Image: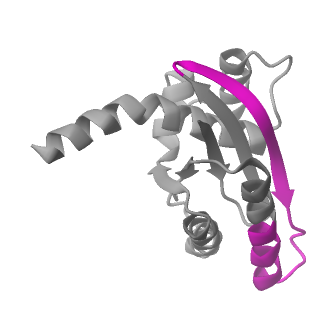
Amino acid sequence: MIVMGIDPGTRRLGWGVLEVVGTRLTHVAHGIVEARETLSLAARLAIMDDGVRAVLAEYAPAECGVESIFFARDPSASAKLGHVRGVVLLALHRAGVAIHEYPPATVKRAVAANGRAEKEQVARMVAAVLRLREPPKADGADALAVAIAHVQSAPARRIAALAARG
């Protein structure tokens, strides 16, 4: 199964794609969709949408983990991030991809065993888990971490689904 992770951002959106076979994770690809800060928010949203849709078209993931909003001190930044997440969620939904959302601390715990891990630690652990020669750049590493967290949460989701059925 192909699984994707997304770390939304208004200037840099990280994405990562993994192949899952049994319990083995294999790195397929990762990257960053970038938009200049000088562009209007609408223009940056269009760039993010185009980038996400291109990745979806190329890799056709079945499921995607998306990092949820953390509430920063700047309400304006959180609102703009919400716009990007809306674009991402809409693109995923329209592509028929199952969407799961994860708080940043959950992602960090899944990869680095510490919900307050620094970006460098997350990147090193992502490289170790996926057997990469070197750690990916921050936004790509964060997106791969989201994908790893998503895969690791699958057994719990299955148990919850079975319990819900009665």
Please give the name of the residue rendered at 47% of the width and 28% of the height, measured from the top-left corner. 152
Which quadrant: the C terminus? top left
Q: Is residue 64 depicted above or below 138 in this figure?
A: below
Q: How many marks?
A: 0
Q: Between 105 and 23, which is closer to the camera in this rendering?
A: 23
Q: Position of residue 107 (x, y in %)?
A: 52, 37
Q: Position of residue 82 (x, y in %)?
A: 57, 71
Q: Is residue 116 visible?
A: no
Residue at horizontal 88%, vertical 79%? 39
Left/right placement of residue 57 relative to residue 35 reads left
Q: Position of residue 118 (x, y in %)?
A: 65, 32
- The residue under the point 63% across, 45% down is 5
Q: Is residue 163 magenta?
A: no
In this image, 63 relative to 2: left or right? left
Q: Quarter of the image holding residue 120?
A: top right
Outermost residue on the left side: it is 166
Is 162 located above or below residue 58 in the figure? above
Q: Position of residue 163 (x, y in %)?
A: 16, 39
Quarter of the image that includes the N terminus: top right
What segment carries the magenta color? Answer: 22-50
